[in-house]
Amino acid sequence: MRYDFETVIRRENAGSGKWDEIKRTLGCFPKDVIPFSVADMEFDMVPEVREGLKAFLDRSVMGYAAMTEEYRQTVVSWEARRHGWQIQPEWIRDTPGVINAFFTAVKAFTKPGEGVMLMTPVYYPMYAAATRHDRVLVDNPLVQEGDTYRIDFEDFAQKAAEPNTKLLILCSPHNPSGRVWTREELERIGRICIDNHVLVVSDEIHCDLLMPGYKHIPFGSISEEFAMNSIICTAPSKTFNLAGLQTSNTIIANEELRQRFYVEQQKDDGNPKCNILGLEGCRLAYAYGDAWLDECLQVIDTNRKVITDYLAREFPQVRVTRLEGTYLLWIDFRGLGIECHELARILKEEAHIFLDEGFIFGEAGEGFERWNLAAPTSYIQAALSRLECLKKHLSGMKREML
């Protein structure tokens, strides 16, 4: 490979939110600890982005930021090149992260007491967006079916038809299930929403992270009608591990919606804006990051196979959800019979493996763990070897039953 995805970069005491959780939980940083939790990567920075930011610092002043025409055209080119979606430069609103974007959309396009629909289990900040500021969560639970999930369209249509339901936050690709919605599924979602005057806010932050054989369909690319009834949230943060630069692109084709979104942004007491390094980091990644991303996806797919094969061999009671997109593997540990909080304790305190507990994604996630695959394969293999401690607990449970 041209790029290095095997060097282990330990980030203790480096200001990493992901790694600091280890110290908060264990009180120290054991040498063998491995974090696979928060969705940022354990890979080194894209070299072209690092060198480009160094050069930018040498020639620029760190004043207030604004999107340049070059920046907008780079985002336009990325969407066309990677996803076949031809957007216009003026559709882009810069936002300091997709969480900020969907919170802004909820405040701009719903009123207190109105409903926001989610397909659960789902990325946990979406629950806050759907319930904070006196909005009401409308829950459309996904249906677990074999090694994947499907949408309950009968329930979806019924809830979209409720007069109080005004907005859908769509997670596409879906986190944590790893589903990449098909064109047919998205068309059904979009038609139901249009027929019932429900606005679609589509969080597509994982859209570049696809497993072989899967294709992401930007919701706004399906038709002009869909584009006019949607707000699309994208960012380089997951794709290129740039979350700390807090920059995202909110793509709004409908001029009226775009203006209302902008007005709501200005109401924010903190007046959040992207920083100048974030905009430049995004531009560099989208301009020069294709080759790095293509190799990164190969490593993620390898890690998926390593974990899936190991669990099938050593823990056949554990069910691994088929990964279509994202670098987050959704694993059902319920077959082990270990209570979910006890399972989390064993993994962290005994195995020194930090995953994201499924229950943080909602009640339907209890007994699951979300495993971040964006790490050196050697990390993955070391972690799997320490899952042997689960066998000791299972043996103890069997003895207690005798």
Image (cartoon, rainbow, N blue to C red):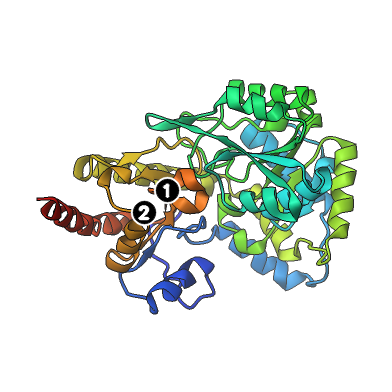
Q: Position of residue 115 (x, y in %)?
A: 72, 40
Secondary structure beneath dot 1 equals loop
Q: Mark 2 points at which residue?
A: 340
Q: How crowded is mark 2: few (under 14 residues within 10 Å), some or many (20 or more)?
A: some
Going from the N terminus, do you reach mark 2 or mark 1 first? 2
- Are circles 2 and 1 on residues that touch, CB within 8 Å? yes
Viewer-proximal residue among 385 and 377: 385
Q: How many labels does the image show?
A: 2
Along the viewing direction, whichever of 152 and 276 lies nearer the viewer? 152
Amino acid at dot 1: Glu
> Residue 58 placed where, x, y %?
72, 72
Label 2 is placed on what type of residue? Cys
Q: Residue at x 75, y 55 (%)?
A: 133
Q: Where is residue 248 in the image (x, y as percent from the top left)?
A: 70, 52
User: Pointer 1: residues within 10 angstroms few (<14), some, or many (20+)?
Assistant: some
Q: Residue at x 20, y 57 (%)?
A: 393
What is the spatial separation of the Cα atoms under label 2 and label 1, in whole angstroms? 6 Å
Q: Residue 366 carries which label?
A: 1
Quarter of the rendering containing residue 346 = bottom left
Q: In this view, does 329 lie above or below 32?
A: above
Q: What element carries label 2?
A: helix
Q: Can residue 27 be seen in this view?
A: yes
Q: Is residue 309 left or right of residue 295?
A: left
